[in-house]
Image (cartoon, rainbow, N blue to C red):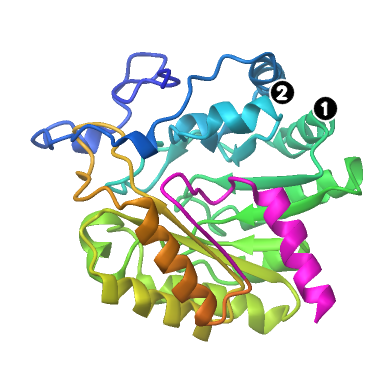
Amino acid sequence: MAVLIDTVTDAAGRLRHPEKAHRPDQPAPPKPAWIRVKAPVSAGYRDTQRIVRENKLHTVCEEAGCPNIGECWEQKHATFMIMGDTCTRACAFCNVKTGLPGALDQTEPEHVAEATRKLGLAHVVVTSVDRDDLADGGAAHFAAVIAAIRERCPATTIEVLTPDFLRKDAAVETVVAARPDVFNHNLETVPSKYLTVRPGARYFASIRLLQRVKDIAPQMFTKSGIMVGLGEERNEILQVMDDLRAAGVDFLTIGQYLQPSRKHHPVMRFVPPEEFKTLETIAYAKGFSMVAASPLTRSSHHAGEDFARLKALRTAR
């Protein structure tokens, strides 16, 4: 796979993860055959890259080192990451830069809308860095982006993948009021791993966020995802499924954790494809309307096709 972004430093030579610099290197086992992907070299990939650059936008595809970027960008499917490229959290699994972010770009909503139009997206996914420095966690900015896309691309359906808005009163209500078609918030891992994998977050706060979305807007589709290979136990995964169903979540994604650098949390295990298939079967049996589970599954991978199927399932009932 081509190197899309330096996992150690940014364009200015600054450390991407200064808080991890002095940690000992973790083992990085070779990837099995089922996890390997082609390097992004297509004309469609280059067109997508050009549109993103022209609009001065960030994508989680690049910043988080998504293995599916070649496939998605060839089809001009990019996931926009708003509110800058620097996160206030320091999760052990993530390759997005950490530090103190700059001020919000008030022109960003229009740039996202214009890039959505140029890419011809029927379904767009908008995510963000964590912005604990903002009073509302960036909720109003999410709402502004949704409004700008609705104005410029009224036929495009919108999926948001939000942070947890921890201790940010009325943030969830602000985003829901902007009427995204899908509200996604990832749990990322099982509760027992939060202290080491997602130390700035709280598991049950994330569950409550997803439940709150359904309380406010029962017809809004909700979605969440976890990674496996971080040392979790099978029974813990099944408990997460039960917790998400209790919160009314419609759509579950499960993918393999991939280690961005030797300073990040190690891969404890590469889960084989047949085990993902078993987890998918169990998740459907527990009542999820839609499940995507495979080594390369990511929140926004095939999001448009999955949303169309999810909507059709509801219509058919």
Which amino acid lies under the numbered mark 2 shown in the image of this protein?
Answer: Asn
- Specify the segment rendered in magenta: 290-317
Report the Cα–Cα distance between label 1 and label 2. Answer: 10 Å
SS for dot 1 = helix
Residue drawn at 53 percent across, 37 percent down = 60
SS for dot 2 = loop
Q: Residue 121 in the image: x percent, y percent?
A: 79, 38
Assess whether residue 162 is covered by the magenta stretch: no
Image-quadrant location for residue 9: top left
In the picture, the disc for residue 55 is 2
Vertical comparison of 155 with 33: above or below: below
Number of callouts = 2
**What residue would you read off at disc 1?**
118
Q: Cβ–Cβ below 8 Å for labels 1 and 2?
A: yes
Image-quadrant location for residue 23: top left
Which amino acid lies under the numbered mark 1 shown in the image of this protein?
Answer: Lys
Q: Residue 35 in the image: x percent, y percent?
A: 38, 37
Assess whether residue 309 is covered by the magenta stretch: yes
In this view of the protein, can residue 200 be seen by the observer? yes
Vertical comparison of 150 with 103: above or below: below
Tell me which numbered mark, 1 or 2, is placed earlier along the sequence.
Answer: 2
Vertical comparison of 168 with 105: above or below: below
Q: Which of 109 and 179 is in front in this view?
A: 179
Circle 1 crowding by C-alpha within 10 Å: few under 14, some 14–19, many from 20: few
Residue drawn at 65 percent across, 84 percent down = 215
In this view of the protein, can residue 57 be seen by the observer? no
Residue 196 relative to residue 121: left or right: left
